[in-house]
Image (cartoon, rainbow, N blue to C red):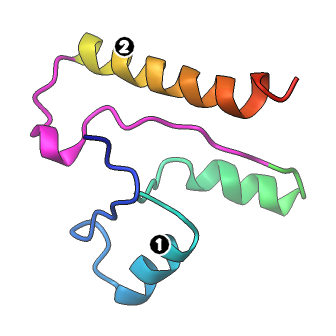
Amino acid sequence: PSPRGQIYRKAVDDAAAVELIQSLGGSLVDMEIYAYVWVAQQFGVPIRVLKAVSDRAQDGATVLWDVAVTACSAELWDVFQAEYLSAS
């Protein structure tokens, strides 16, 4: 099952942070993209990040890399089509 709507509470122990993430519709915490978002905000550049999780905690991180990447690519393509191509 997809982790959408779930918050990984082990990664975020601060209850206020978890509440904020949930109120924004977030489903996980991503630290790697923070720098991109921060720089974009500093320059007033809109940014939207689409990212798929390749090693979900419930999988035990044992999924083979090529299988995980294939699944993530398909999931991202579906979102991209729905968000950007269906509007045209």
Q: Position of residue 1 (x, y in %)?
A: 25, 40
Query: In the image, what residue type sits under mark 1?
Result: Gln
Query: In the image, what residue type sits under mark 2?
Result: Thr
Disc 2 from disc 1: Cα separation: 28 Å
- In this rendering, position of residue 82 left or right of residue 63: right
Looking at marks 2 and 1 on the same chain, the residue that comes earlier in the sequence is marked by 1
In front of the other: 41 or 67: 67
Q: Residues within 10 Å of mark 1 (few under 14, many from 20)?
A: some
Instruction: Please report the bounds of the magenta region as a residue range.
Output: 47-64
Q: How many marks can you see?
A: 2
Helix, strand or loop under label 2? helix
In front of the other: 40 or 22: 22
Helix, strand or loop under label 1? helix
Q: Position of residue 62 (x, y in %)?
A: 10, 28
Q: Position of residue 53 (x, y in %)?
A: 37, 38
- In this rendering, position of residue 24 left or right of residue 21: right
Which residue in the protein does label 1 denote? Answer: 22
- In this rendering, position of residue 76 left or right of residue 56: right
Q: Residue at x 68, y 54 (%)?
A: 37
Q: Residues within 10 Å of mark 2 (few under 14, many from 20)?
A: few
Residue 27 quadrant: bottom left
Residue projecting furthest to the front: 86
Residue 43 quadrant: bottom right
Q: Residue at x 56, y 20 (%)?
A: 77
Which residue in the protein does label 2 denote? Answer: 70
In front of the other: 78 or 46: 78
Q: Is residue 40 part of the magenta span, yes or no?
A: no
Numbered label attached to residue 85: none
